[in-house]
Image: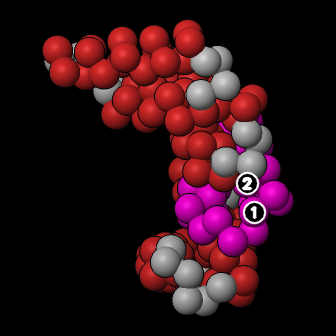
Amino acid sequence: MNNKITTDVAQLKERLNKDVRDVEAAQSLGNMYCDNGDAGQAALYYRHALDINPALSGVRTDLGAMYWRNENISLAEQAFREVIAQDPGFGQAYVNLGLLLQHAKGNVAEARSVWQQLLNINPNHEMASKARDLLRNTEAMIN
């Protein structure tokens, strides 16, 4: 990590040490570690943020991505499915779950079903074009 990031991390850890319930500091630390390729540390801080506020769909989706990066496919899948169950409008979780099903589990049919589910729920969602692209790109794989 460069000096600025090291300083930012130290400041965020200091904030968290002063107030263990500082969800913004925990989430920011998770994001910084994620951006620097340290999935283990990122997951640690994302879990802490979720202990404070379990309703953070973006954080739970990011946690799933970190699990996947660490090759813990079952926990990644569980995290994405929990987001979809708790917050059906959170499109990134559908995209991520589908990609995990396709690439990590080799289940293209189920991946396509997940992406289609997002389009059925909200065809105008900001992630809808990504879901349509993924459906188009995988169409030949199931025929």
Disc 2, disc 1: CB below 8 Å?
Answer: yes
Quarter of the view holding residue 17: top right
**Residue topped by disc 1:** 87
Q: Residue furthest front?
A: 18
Secondary structure under tag 2 reads helix
| 15 inside magenta stretch | no
- Does residue 82 show up magenta in the picture? yes
Q: Quick check: 80 left or right of 68?
A: right
Q: Is residue 113 left or right of residue 34?
A: right
The Cα atoms of the two marked residues, 2 and 1, are separated by 6 Å
**Near-viewer residue (134 or 9):** 9
Q: Which residue is mark 2?
A: 83
Please, is residue 112 above or below residue 72 in the view? below
Instruction: From the viewer's side, name the closer residue of 136 and 48.
Output: 48
Residue 9 visible in this rendered orientation of the protein: yes
Magenta-highlighted residues: 70-98
At a point 62% along the width and 58% down the height, the residue shown is: 93
Q: Is residue 142 left or right of residue 50?
A: left
- Of the pair 99 and 53, the residue shown nearer to us: 53
Q: Circle 2: is it few (<14), some (14-19), or many (20+) Cα within 10 Å?
A: many
The residue under label 1 is which amino acid type?
Asp
Residue drawn at point x = 49 percent, y = 18 percent: 15
Return the mark for residue 120: none
The furthest residue to the left = 3
Q: Position of residue 10 (x, y in %)?
A: 36, 12
Residue 34 position by quadrant = top left
Residue 70 visible at all: no
Instruction: State whether the magenta stretch is mostly helix, strand or loop.
Output: helix
Tell me the amino acid under the disc marked 2. Answer: Val
The quadrant of the picture occupied by the C terminus is: bottom right
Residue at left offset 46%, top offset 82%: 129
Q: Quadrant of the N terminus?
A: top left
